[in-house]
Amino acid sequence: MATALIILAAGMGTRMNSELPKVLHAIAGAPMLIHAMKSGASLDPERTVIVAGHGATAVGKVAQDWDDRAEVVLQAEQLGTGHGVAQASGALSDFSGDAFVLYGDTPFIRPETLTAMSAARQFHDVVVLGFDAADPGRYGRLVTSGEVLERIVEFKDASDEERAITLCNSGVVAADSATLFDLVAAIKNDNAAGEYYLTDIIEIARSRGLSATVVRCDESETMGINSRAELAVAEGAFQTARRAEALADGVTLQAPETVYFAHDTVIGRDSIIEPNVVFGPDVTVESGATIRAFSHLEGCHVSRGSVVGPYARLRPGAELAENVKIGNFVEVKNAQIAEGAKVNHLSYIGDATIGAGSNIGAGTITCNYDGVSKHHTVIGARVFVGSNTMLVAPVTLGDDSMTASGSVITRDVPAEALALSRAPQEIKLGLAKRMFEKLKSKKAKATKGA
Ligand code: UD1
Ligand code: MG
């Protein structure tokens, strides 16, 4: 059955106290809206409609950068969740199939949970996702009788008896798309908040002879984010779950609580991640690689058997082939490093390619930027770059070539050649001794005078 997602993301998020629309605040390096879209993507939706309001342009751009088929509709005034869903009716007027309503600020709904809702749709016209809340607080309460969902009552409108119910509304709803929009069109705003409550569709559906039920999920999935404090809790929850997943996948984490993952980090089996490693977005680490302590990686690929760090920084476009070594205080950006090459100490490798088996000496810098444009450095295979070489790009070092330490290389070096470019060394016999004596006597005179 074809599926459409309607993701409500129009709210201002006043309690975030932010210039940024709430749904664009990030968890594990991705806006929470993307987390919601990713969980919805597990239904393989034919259509995705984002209902945007506050910061709609920015929200739409983020959604479409992630999925260029996502459609964005504007809810200029936020008159309630029911009103929000109604804004998607025009966009989906030509759609037939099931619609799932998700919230942009509820990032952790699991694919399995949505699948369970799809399954329940075979037997019921409207399916609501509920959870047993440890502290039901201000959530809407689900009034049930056996499998049947009779109605949802918002906290503000609930009686004491209803407030005692612990089964709460997550906000996620699934129904046939045309049916959903029919029901939503009948919602009124005669309630304590003066809002068009999406939750009213249950009573409306039942009055029309349609059936409604609840699928339950764990409370951790329905966590909604309304403040920076809740954002921090959500980040913590994500990290805890992701660390457990990495361990179960056969990755060694020596101090799991100090390793930070991004939403899309991929780490192969039998990799070792030492303490205090941070993964930014878009990192793949193949099996059997080691990421040593205090390293920071983003937008990079580390192949099998490579060792990175301690204290290394891999930036976007860093591609390490197998058995590469990147040592302490080395920064790599937009560079392909071939098999077995080593950059062991204190270097910057940016906009470069390094051939197999090359050794880049301590302190080597690719001078890739002239103040206006970036330029490329090509280092062939089996090259020995002497310590503290400055490679002024664009420049090429041929296979099996060598540079002398301290050289500033501005011209291409042919294969098998040695390039040497530094001031010739002079020796002044006895001069050090005379200098020391002179300096010491000067200091002694100065101290006496004081
Ligand atoms: C809603 C539910 C409540 C449920 C709770 C779960 C209703 C009436 N209540 O309450 O039963 O327990 O979520 O978290 O549905 N939004 C729009 N446009 C609007 C209003 C809201 O896009 O006009 C978006 C918000 O940005 C947010 C989501 O919909 O992402 C939920 O809205 P919110 O105001 O947080 O609803 P709650 O009062 O929490
Ligand atoms: Mg809310």
Image: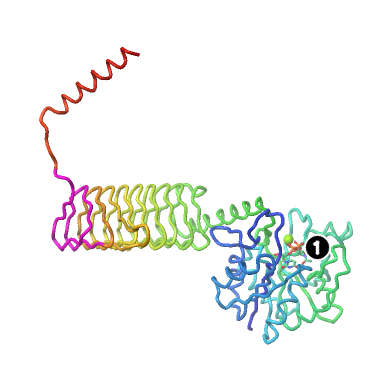
- Residues 226 and 408: in front is 408
Estimate the x, y position of residue 128 in percent, counting from the top left.
74, 71
Q: Is residue 392 above or below residue 96?
A: above
Furthest residue toward top: 448
Position of 270 with respect to 129 (left or right) is left
Q: Quadrant of residue 214?
A: bottom right
Quarter of the image holding residue 287?
A: bottom left
The residue that mark 1 highlights is: 141
Residue 105 within the segment the image draws in magenta: no
Screen quadrant of the C terminus: top left
Is 77 or 430 nearer to us in this picture? Answer: 430
Span colored in magenta: 395-424
Residue 201: quarter of image = bottom right
Residue type at tag 1: Arg
Q: Position of residue 10 (x, y in %)?
A: 70, 67
Q: Main secondary structure of the magenta part?
A: loop
Residue drawn at (24%, 51%) of the image: 389
Residue 407 magenta: yes
Quadrant of the rendered image holding ligand 2 = bottom right
The answer as to whether callout 1 falls within 8 Å of ligand 1 is yes
Give the image location of residue 25, x and y in percent: 61, 59
Above/below status of 308 relative to 189: above
Q: Position of residue 383 (x, y in %)?
A: 20, 58
Tell me the residue at 63%/83% (across/down).
2
Which residue in the rendered view is the most extreme toward the front?
A: 449
- The N terminus sits in image quarter: bottom right
Residue at 18% in and 51% down: 421
Does residue 138 appear left or right of residue 160 in this picture?
left
Compared with 371, 144 (above or below) is: below
Residue at image coords 24%, 20%: 440
Label 1: state its secondary structure: strand
